[in-house]
Structures are given as structure tokens and as C-alpha cells.
């Protein structure tokens, strides 16, 4: 299959060091944030009045909430937020077909390894370039099934009823400071609706990147999977390396209705100067299943805890995550499950690797509410330390208010074993190859769940990162 | 060292003490009362459970010491079965001290902190108490105890003196509406071994009372200190304890904290493994019923290579009891080749019981073996079924499973010396189970 060959040609070395296209955009706000900017964003997007009110309310909540004092070091963020552009609009209108996409954007996708040929295999490519959906396509057969895969702006325009019913209900404005910020200035993201009983065989994919220095990206995604439907959504992001700090704060809201099944896969490889503070949450109804597959490789600081609120009887939530913290990076990630109904089950598997002075922290919550009888939850965290200066932390919160529930948490911390390396070197591998092999083996249980191109990319990245890691 | 020993002039000592107390009191006053916004108090809302402002903490450091100028009675311990010494506390004052003649002759010190009878003990107290081990800065309640402590004991074990049988301390409360703050200072010199078992008991009180205990332990090179605390106080009491251990090269400090009584119980336990070979086993057992609220906050600090720690806290909760556990293993950059473990398991026996667990790891070295585990769950139905099929009633079967679950902790105590502790604790748990 040509797909994997093309991925092989990704040229990860260049990819690692980033690339920058000359800036081109139609409109952007002044740096910093105040009410006039929020009003301007809403006006530019020609939004209904209720959305403007929603944004303004969110702005007030954002301003009133203090900076979090837990998690990663946010001491420089206040200054950063004064300098970034909260809204950049690259083009006047959303493109309709691949041919219409401008060449420089196509170039960017080329470098990202999303060749034109590949899109045929993909359900629809919603490519987010800067803050706006610039390209969108959806297979006709799915359109005929009633599947909606739109930019979030079009979702609001074209499907106002279902949009308003769910928007901001899963992650309320006041959930946390950054979800409030996102609610005030959101721009770009996806709107997905999968109707009752529809099974999507191939995943929906959205790639996006940030390409403007000091530009914040506040994507907002709303996904509704109706009763008995099945779907898989893949989101990956890369960003070029810049010298000043950048900021990304997304909000992902998902509803998985009765008997439905949904998986959300995301790999982030932001450049190492990026603050990545994301709120992702799914409400899971009766006998439905939600799976988060979460890879955090890049950014300066990531704080991201995908969560499942198991609201209906028999609901299941699963969170699988990989975190890689290289030099200067802090991955503060984990997962959150709330058992709010009987016989709900959940599982969290987290694997992290810390290299050089990198720090990876698992932070998770498992909460069983009173009345959620027969609930079961299991959490496993494994941390691998590569160098003497590497750091790992585990902060699980376990709150059980129900007698008939079983909750377990286990974590281990280890380094790559000398015996393992010795064995592999005996078999003719170099130290670095042996190291990469052991690390890949450590990640295997989660990597095998990834779509092929991501798994290949992940393995290439690990090899690259293990170069010179021999201590 | 009999009761009739004439005291030297200790005015210097007392002025040092007054200064230490005033300092601690000003720290207490300037430290805000912990709220649930702080991670360490996340699950214990003092403003609801025990509003300090409603409580008479008449804290005048100068006058609070006046009541305790009477020297405790000292006797030779004549029936030393399984016991090396005895200390009796009444209403926060040391009222009776007994030592076996063998202990006396080996130079083991067992003395009141407020009314020392031995000059050497005073020097040790002045050098260590409320300062470098558990200073007033450690927290609001640590400061309060450092300011208001009425009495306490020092246990001093000279070099290479190894005492197999434990010293036993008994705390009785008298019914006076007054805070009781006591301290324990244990200094084990090189190569020594000592065990101390303390027990807190009282009736139930209708009015709210505050009982505080501060424990400071130093184990020098190759020394072993075994420390057991059994808290079985009556309802109406807020019991607050802080324990801190400094463990030096190849030394061990092993602790067991049993929490059965009081309405609200809070333990802060910190062990510092300072030099290679230092080791600590930390055991905990709790059983809560009615509306009891237990909060255990533990930390294992590995500050040198080749150190080990192993923590196991197990408990069961009946009625609408609540237990919180927050434990942290910190492995510093220097502490390579560390083995550190931490386990917290809680059984919920009733629909209204609630358990919160936060087992944390912060690892900054790479060549370590660390793990932690935490479970919250119900009685193992298979184990209960097995016993039912052997003819036990459901009640008997469930009690046996609970006892087996908790007995796991007691089974880890060294045999012999702690036989009596195991029996007392088992009896107390059984008694609570019968009421449930």
C-alpha cells in the first residue's frame, strides 16, 4: 500500500525541527484580550446574538478565575497571554474542494505527510490551518447517511438546533480558567454529528497546524454520536518551532448516546515552546462506550486530562495515553472518569517516558458517586526514566462514595534494565538501537491501538529521540 | 535517678523554652487555618468538622506551663513482663515513670520533657525539641503543639544499647475542657535499638475536645526505632498527630499507626531517609464507624542512594465513616538505587461510607524501583461465600474477612515484642465490628 511508503518518506528530521511558511492572512486582531476583541471575533463570524452573549459571559468568568497553582509551571503564561493574537483569519471562505486549496497550504500538508492521494482513504479531511477550517470534504455516501462533518462555524450556521442543544453543556464555561478563555475566543474546530445506527468504517480525520508566531489557537470541537452509532475521530497536530512562547487551549465536547461507540484519537507534537492546555470531556450514556487514545509528544507544557462522565447504566470509558517528555518539556497528563450510574466500568492505562531533564506527570481522577453500584475501575500507570535527571510524578485521586464498587490503581516506575540492553547488544544491536527497541516495547500496548500511520510516525520519533540518549 | 533527686538550676533551660513557645505561638497565629483548597487538606473540611474559632484554645504560652511543675513519680518497674518501661500520662501531664533496673544501668533515659531530672536530657531536649526535626513552621497544628505542649517524654538510648521489649506509654484524658498537647522525642544513638508503644484512650465527650501529639525521632547510624501508636479515644475529640523521623546510615525507623477512635483524626507522618542504607517500614490500620472522619497524610522522602521505604495502610469503614489517605513518595536526584513502595487499601462496609485515596509519586532519579497501589472496594464475596459454605453465619463470615484483611498489617510486626499490641488492636477492632 502506498500509504505507508509515503509515511516512510516523511523525513522526520526536518519535521522535528519545524518549518515556517510566509505568513498570509486576511484578518487578525491586535495582541492581548479585551471585550472589543471578543465582540470583533463574533462580528467577523456573523454569529447569532446568543453566541456573543455566551462569549462575553465566558470572558468575565475567565477574568475572574485565578491562574491554576497546580500542575505545570504557568508563571510565564500571564505575560505570554498579553502578547498573543487571539484571532487570525487566514481566508475569506471555507474551501470546497482540494483543487481550491492554496498552494502554500498544500505545501504544508505535504510536509506533514498528508498526501493528496491519501484523502481518498480518509472519510473527510477537515484541515485546520491557522484558526479556521480551510478545507473540508465529506464522502457523498456519508452525506447521504446524514453524517455531518463540518467546521464548528458551519455547524453553528447550518445546524443551529442540534448545535445549541449541546454546545457548552458538556464543558460549562466555568469549568476552568482555560475552558472559559476558549469559550470567549474560540475559533475553528470540528462539528460532527453521527446519526442513529450509522457505522463509520473509516475514521474522520482533522489535521491542523499553527503557523503564525505569537498566535493562540482556540479550537473548539463538538461531537455528537447518536444512539447505536459508531465512529472514530482522529486529530493530530504539529507546529513549527518558534522562538517565543505559543499557546494552545482547545475544548473538545463529546456526547456518546445510548448503545453508541466512539473513539477519539489524538497525537500532539507541538513545538517545544507551546503551552498546550486542553479540556476534553465525553458524556457517555447507557451502554455506550467512549475511548480516548491520547499521545502527547511535543509542547513545552501540556496539561490535558481527557475525561469520561459515565452517566448511563452500563456505560464504559477507556483512556489510553502515552506521554513523552524530552529536555525542557513537562507533560502533565492523565485522565478522569466519573462513575455516575450503575454497572459502569472504566480503565485508564498511562505510559510515560522522561528523558534528559524532561518531566512527565500522571494526574488522574477516579470518582464513584453514591448509587453507582457495581462500578469497576482500574488504573495502571507505568513510567520509564531514561536519564539520571529525568523526573516522573504520579498524582492519582481516588474518591469512592459507593460500597458496591471496585476501584484499583497501580503505578510503577523503572529505568531501562541493564540486562535488557545487554541481551539485545549480544544479539548485535547497537546501544541506541537496543534502547529504542526497549522503549518501543514499553509503548507497544498503546501503540498497537494507533492507526498505522501514527504508529509508524511514533516509532520513527522514538528512534529519533533515543539518539544520544545512552547514559 | 530516683524521685527524690534534687533539681539543678534550670532557669536557662526554661527561658529557652519560653522563647521557643512564644515563637511557635506567633507562627500559629500567623498561619491560616488549613482549608480544603490546600492539597493536604483536600478531603478534611475543618470549618465544618471542627471550627477552631468555636473552640477554647486559651493559648497563653507563659501560663499554660504553670500547671505542670510537679515532678512525675518515678518507680522501678517490678513486673517487667514484655515491658522495658512504663509512662503514664494523665490529662497531658506525665504522672508516673517506671523503668526496669536493667534499663537504668545501661543508661537508657526515660524522662518528662517539662520536668527533666537529668541534665544531659535537658541538653538533648534543647538541641532537638521543636527545632530541626519537627519545627513549628511545619504547619498550623505543629506550631500549636510547639506552643502549647503541656508535657511529654524523651527517650534516649545510648550507643549500642539494644532493648528488645517496648517501653509503653498510656495517655488518659481527664474530663476538663482543655486542649491536650503532648510531645515525644526519641533519640537512638549509633547501633541502638528501642521500641515505644503509646496508647491514647478516653471516654466519649459531648463537648468537642482537641488532643494533639507531636513525635520526633532520630535514628543514628545502624540504630533501629520501632514506634507504635494506638489511638482509641472517645467521640467528640479531634485528634491531631504529627510524626517525623530522621533516619541515618543503615538505620531503620518502623512505625505503626492504629486509628480507631476520636470523631476526627488527622495524622501527618513524614520519614526522611537521609543516608545510604536508611530504611523505613510504615504501617497503618484504621477502622471507622458512625460519623468518624480519618485523614492520613504521609510522606516518604528519599534523600540518599540505596534507601528503602515500604508503606502499607489498610482500613475498613462502616456507618457513614469517611477516610482520606494522601501519601507521597519523593525520590530526590541523589537517591539512586531506591526501593520505595506505597499501598493503601480500604474496605467499604456500608452504603454511606466513603474513601478517598491519593497515592502520589515524585521521582527525580532514574535507577529506582518504585510502585504504589491503591484500592477501594467491598468485601470479597468469594471469601464470604466460602465461609458461609463452612457453616458460619453471614455476620461471622463478614467479620472474619474484615479481620483477615486488617490482620495483614499486624502480621508484619516483629513477633514477640508486639504480641500484646496485636492482641489489643484485634480486640478493639472486634469490639467495633460487634457494634456495627
Image (tube, rainbow, N blue to C red):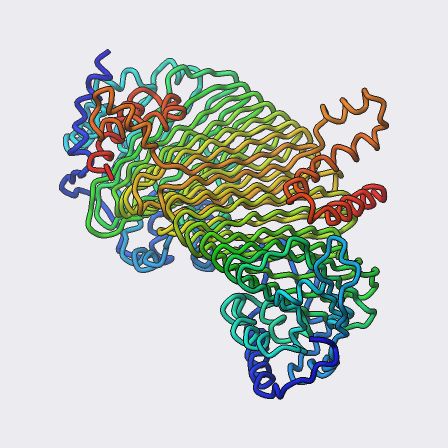
Identify which residue is drawn at 55% across, 31% down: A378
Report whether B208 appears left or right of A68.
right
On the image, the x and y values in percent for residue A353 come to: 35, 37
Q: Nearer the viewer, residue B43 or A187?
A: B43
Residue A232 against residue B59 in the figure, above or below: above
On the image, the x and y values in percent for residue B362 come to: 43, 48
Q: Nearer the viewer, residue A244 or B197?
A: B197
Identify which residue is drawn at 49% across, 25% down: A225
On the image, the x and y values in percent for residue A212 come to: 22, 45
Report whether B371 appears left or right of A286.
left
Identify which residue is drawn at 24% across, 22% down: A426
Q: In terms of image quadrants, where is residue B262?
A: bottom right
* Quadrant holding the C terminus of chain A: top left
Looking at the image, can residue A153 be seen?
no
On the image, the x and y values in percent for residue B314 come to: 65, 42
Report whether A40 appears left or right of A71.
left
Residue farthest top in this picture: A1
Q: In terms of image quadrants, where is residue B47?
A: bottom right
* Quadrant holding the N terminus of chain A: top left
Q: Nearer the viewer, residue A291 or A457?
A: A457
Q: In terms of image quadrants, where is residue B175?
A: bottom right
Amino acid at each position: 500500500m502506498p500509504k505507508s511508503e509515503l509515511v516512510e518518506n516523511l523525513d522526520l528530521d526536518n519535521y522535528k525541527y519545524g518549518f515556517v511558511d510566509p505568513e498570509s492572512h486576511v484578518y487578525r486582531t491586535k495582541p492581548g484580550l479585551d471585550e472589543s476583541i471578543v465582540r470583533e471575533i463574533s462580528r467577523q463570524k456573523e454569529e447569532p446574538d446568543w453566541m456573543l452573549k455566551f462569549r462575553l459571559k465566558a470572558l468575565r468568568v475567565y477574568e475572574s478565575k485565578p491562574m491554576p497553582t497546580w500542575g505545570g509551571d504557568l508563571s510565564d503564561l500571564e505575560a505570554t497571554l498579553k502578547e498573543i493574537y487571539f484571532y487570525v483569519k487566514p481566508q475569506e471562505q471555507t474551501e470546497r474542494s482540494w483543487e481550491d486549496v492554496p498552494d502554500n497550504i498544500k505545501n504544508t500538508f505535504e510536509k506533514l505527510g498528508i498526501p493528496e492521494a491519501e484523502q481518498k482513504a480518509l472519510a473527510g479531511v477537515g484541515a485546520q490551518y491557522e484558526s479556521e477550517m480551510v478545507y473540508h470534504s465529506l464522502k457523498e455516501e456519508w452525506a447521504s447517511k446524514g453524517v455531518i462533518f463540518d467546521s464548528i462555524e458551519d455547524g453553528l450556521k447550518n445546524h443551529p438546533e442540534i448545535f445549541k442543544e449541546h454546545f457548552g453543556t458538556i464543558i460549562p464555561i466555568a469549568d476552568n480558567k482555560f475552558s472559559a478563555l476558549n469559550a470567549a475566543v474560540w475559533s475553528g474546530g470540528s462539528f460532527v454529528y453521527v446519526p442513529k445506527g450509522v457505522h463509520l468504517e473509516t475514521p474522520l480525520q482533522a489535521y491542523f497546524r499553527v503557523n503564525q508566531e505569537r498566535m493562540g489557537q482556540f479550537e473548539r470541537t463538538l461531537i455528537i454520536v447518536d444512539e447505536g452509532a459508531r465512529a472514530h475521530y482522529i486529530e493530530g497536530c504539529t507546529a513549527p518551532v518558534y522562538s517565543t512562547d505559543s499557546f494552545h487551549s482547545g475544548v473538545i465536547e463529546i456526547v456518546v448516546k445510548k448503545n453508541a461507540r466512539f473513539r477519539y484519537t489524538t497525537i500532539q507534537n507541538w513545538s517545544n515552546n507551546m503551552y498546550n492546555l486542553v479540556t476534553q470531556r465525553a458524556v457517555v450514556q447507557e451502554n455506550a462506550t467512549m475511548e480516548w487514545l491520547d499521545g502527547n509528544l511535543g509542547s513545552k507544557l501540556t496539561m490535558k486530562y481527557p475525561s469520561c462522565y459515565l452517566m448511563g447504566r452500563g456505560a464504559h470509558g477507556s483512556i489510553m495515553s502515552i506521554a513523552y517528555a524530552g529536555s525542557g518539556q513537562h507533560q502533565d497528563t492523565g485522565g478522569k472518569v466519573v462513575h455516575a450510574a450503575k454497572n459502569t466500568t472504566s480503565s485508564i492505562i498511562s505510559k510515560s517516558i522522561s528523558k534528559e531533564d524532561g518531566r512527565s506527570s500522571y494526574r488522574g481522577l477516579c470518582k464513584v458517586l453514591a448509587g453507582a453500584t457495581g462500578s469497576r475501575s482500574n488504573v495502571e500507570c507505568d513510567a520509564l526514566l531514561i536519564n539520571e535527571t529525568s523526573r516522573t510524578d504520579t498524582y492519582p485521586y481516588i474518591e469512592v462514595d459507593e460500597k458496591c464498587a471496585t476501584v484499583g490503581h497501580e503505578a510503577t516506575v523503572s529505568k531501562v534494565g541493564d540486562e535488557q540492553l545487554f541481551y539485545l547488544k549480544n544479539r548485535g544491536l547497537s546501544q541506541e538501537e537496543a534502547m529504542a527497541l526497549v522503549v518501543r516495547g514499553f509503548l507497544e500496548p498503546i501503540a498497537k491501538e494507533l492507526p498505522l500511520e501514527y504508529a509508524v510516525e511514533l516509532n520513527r520519533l522514538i528512534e529519533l529521540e533515543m539518539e544520544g540518549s545512552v547514559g | 535517678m530516683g524521685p527524690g533527686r534534687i533539681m539543678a538550676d534550670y532557669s536557662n533551660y526554661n527561658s529557652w523554652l519560653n522563647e521557643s513557645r512564644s515563637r511557635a505561638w506567633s507562627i500559629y497565629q500567623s498561619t491560616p487555618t488549613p482549608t480544603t483548597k490546600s492539597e493536604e487538606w483536600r478531603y478534611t473540611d475543618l470549618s465544618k468538622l471542627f471550627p477552631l474559632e468555636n473552640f477554647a484554645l486559651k493559648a497563653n504560652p507563659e501560663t499554660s506551663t504553670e500547671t505542670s511543675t510537679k515532678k512525675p513519680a518515678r518507680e522501678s518497674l517490678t513486673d517487667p513482663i514484655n515491658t522495658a518501661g512504663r509512662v503514664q500520662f494523665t490529662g497531658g501531664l506525665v504522672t508516673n515513670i517506671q523503668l526496669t533496673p536493667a534499663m537504668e544501668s545501661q543508661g537508657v533515659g526515660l524522662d518528662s520533657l517539662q520536668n527533666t531530672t537529668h541534665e544531659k536530657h535537658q541538653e538533648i531536649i534543647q538541641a532537638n525539641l521543636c527545632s530541626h526535626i519537627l519545627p513549628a513552621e511545619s504547619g498550623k497544628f505543629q506550631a500549636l503543639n510547639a506552643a502549647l505542649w503541656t508535657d511529654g517524654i524523651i527517650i534516649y538510648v545510648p550507643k549500642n544499647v539494644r532493648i528488645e521489649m517496648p517501653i509503653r506509654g498510656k495517655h488518659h484524658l481527664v474530663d476538663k475542657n482543655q486542649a491536650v498537647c503532648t510531645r515525644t522525642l526519641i533519640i537512638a544513638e549509633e547501633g541502638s535499638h528501642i521500641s515505644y508503644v503509646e496508647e491514647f484512650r478516653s471516654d466519649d465527650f459531648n463537648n468537642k475536645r482537641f488532643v494533639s501529639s507531636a513525635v520526633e525521632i532520630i535514628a543514628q547510624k545502624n540504630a533501629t526505632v520501632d514506634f507504635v501508636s494506638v489511638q482509641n479515644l472517645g467521640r467528640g475529640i479531634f485528634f491531631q498527630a504529627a510524626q517525623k523521623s530522621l533516619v541515618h546510615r543503615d538505620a531503620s525507623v518502623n512505625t505503626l499507626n492504629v486509628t480507631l477512635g476520636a470523631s476526627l483524626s488527622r495524622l501527618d507522618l513524614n520519614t526522611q531517609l537521609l543516608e545510604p542504607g536508611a530504611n523505613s517500614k510504615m504501617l497503618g490500620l484504621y477502622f471507622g464507624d458512625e460519623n468518624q472522619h480519618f485523614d492520613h497524610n504521609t510522606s516518604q522522602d528519599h534523600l540518599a542512594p540505596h534507601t528503602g521505604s515500604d508503606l502499607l495502610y489498610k482500613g475498613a469503614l462502616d456507618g457513614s465513616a469517611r477516610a482520606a489517605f494522601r501519601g507521597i513518595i519523593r525520590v530526590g536526584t541523589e537517591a539512586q538505587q531506591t526501593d520505595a513502595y506505597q499501598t493503601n487499601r480500604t474496605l467499604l462496609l456500608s452504603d454511606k461510607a466513603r474513601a478517598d485515596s491519593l497515592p502520589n509519586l515524585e521521582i527525580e532519579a532514574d535507577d529506582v524501583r518504585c510502585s504504589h497501589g491503591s484500592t477501594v472496594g467491598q468485601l470479597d464475596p468469594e471469601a464470604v461465600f466460602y465461609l458461609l459454605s463452612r457453616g458460619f453465619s453471614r455476620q461471622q463470615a463478614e467479620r472474619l474477612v474484615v479481620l483477615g484483611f486488617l490482620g495483614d498489617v499486624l502480621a508484619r510486626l516483629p513477633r514477640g515484642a508486639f504480641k500484646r499490641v496485636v492482641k489489643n488492636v484485634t480486640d478493639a477492632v472486634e469490639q467495633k465490628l460487634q457494634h456495627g
